[in-house]
Amino acid sequence: MTRCEFCGTRAPVTSVVFRQNTGMIVFRQTRAWEGHACRDCGRAIFRRATLHTALFGWWGTISLFVTPVFLVLNVVHLARVLRMPSVEVVRRAQLAAHEAYAQNLLATKDRRTVAEVLQRESGASRSEVEAFLDGLVAARAA
Ligand SMILES: [Zn+2]
């Protein structure tokens, strides 16, 4: 678990290179997104680079050959990205792993403090932590 280089989120990441080609008959322009991406960023960059290349990549002699290669490589990297769990799933699992800890904290500390601690420990957003705490409180009341 490290940090995504594209969004900064603490999440599982994988090394990716997504390439984009723009064919302009005589000229061509390429762009690459290279780094360690979380699942969400990987999917978003894939969508952007691949859609652009599929539409605007073909126009030119070299581009005609480069474009299918880029498209295939982008799909290969997408497959790596899709093997990782999403950031949301990871955060929910991290919060669930803190359940006993959260129960103990709730018994002695006010809810705001508990939420701040959980947010720091799990990397989850405030709304995710609040939803998790709502669940815990509801389970206690039942
Ligand atoms: Zn990301």
Image: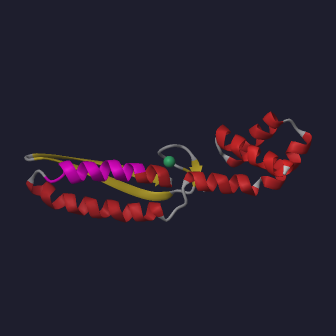
Please, which residue is most extreme toward the right here?
108
Task: Judge from the rendering whether residue 70 lies leftward or rightward of residue 44; answer left or right.
Answer: left
Q: Which residues are magenta?
A: 44-58
Q: Quadrant of the N terminus?
A: bottom right
Q: Give whichever of 5, 107 is nearer the camera.
A: 107
Q: How is the image coloured?
A: secondary structure
Q: What residue is rendered at 79% in x and 54% in y?
A: 99
Which quadrant would residue 62 be assigned to in this image? bottom left
Q: Assign the magenta stretch its main secondary structure.
A: helix
Residue 45 lies, in percent from the top left, at 38, 49
Q: What residue is rendered at 54% in x and 43% in y?
A: 8
Please, which residue is most extreme toward the front here?
142
Q: Give whichever of 50, 88 is nearer the camera.
A: 88
Specify whether residue 56 is painted magenta.
Answer: yes
Q: What residue is rendered at 73% in x and 55% in y?
A: 96
Q: Give whichever of 67, 128 is nearer the camera.
A: 128
Residue 68 lies, in percent from the top left, at 21, 62
Q: What residue is rendered at 88% in x and 38% in y?
A: 109
Residue 52 lies, in percent from the top left, at 25, 48
Task: Judge from the rendering whether residue 79 lies leftward or rightward of residue 55; answer left or right.
Answer: right
Task: Judge from the rendering whether residue 87 lies leftward or rightward of residue 101; answer left or right.
Answer: left
Q: Is residue 32 visible in this depiction of the protein?
A: no
Which quadrant would residue 116 be assigned to in this image? top right
Specify whether residue 142 is painted magenta.
Answer: no
Residue 53 lies, in percent from the top left, at 24, 51
Q: Give whichever of 100, 72 is nearer the camera.
A: 100
Q: Is residue 97 visible in this depiction of the protein?
A: yes
Q: How many marks?
A: 0
